[in-house]
Amino acid sequence: MFKTERAKVTIRCNVCGETFTLRGRREPEGQVETGFKQCLCDNDQYFSINES
């Protein structure tokens, strides 16, 4: 079984300023998948994403 690396990610909405801290799995391509879809304000495009 292939193990993936876990990563902590902070997502900040650029519309309302809400902040989310999530854990995700690092894909072999280098991207982190958290399953996050949209903010509470229905924003689904404009985010600042930082890996901790």
Image: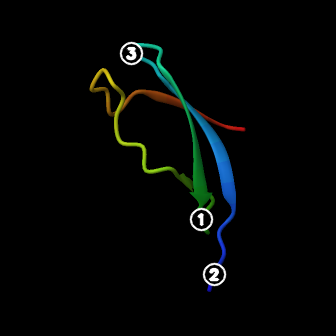
Q: Is residue 34 left or right of residue 46?
A: right
Structural distance between the alpha carbons of marks 2 and 1: 14 Å
Q: Which residue is mark 1?
A: 29
Q: Nearer the viewer, mark 3 or mark 2?
A: 2
Q: What is the three-letter code of the residue carrying label 1?
A: Glu
> Which tag, 3 or 1, sits closer to the chain's start?
3
Q: Is residue 18 left or right of residue 2?
A: left
- Quarter-wise, where is residue 45 in the image? top left
Structural distance between the alpha carbons of marks 3 and 2: 37 Å
Q: Are marks 3 and 2 in contact (CB under 8 Å)?
A: no
Task: Name which residue lies at 47% across and 14% down.
Answer: 17
Q: Which residue is mark 2?
A: 2
x, y percent for residue 46: 40, 27
Q: Which residue is mark 3?
A: 15
Q: Is residue 25 above or below residue 2?
A: above
Q: Secondary structure at mark 3?
A: loop
In front of the other: 7 or 49: 7
Task: Name which residue lies at 62% across and 86% down.
Answer: 1
x, y percent for residue 52: 72, 38
- Quarter-wise, where is residue 6 in the image? bottom right
Q: Nearer the viewer, mark 3 or mark 1?
A: 3
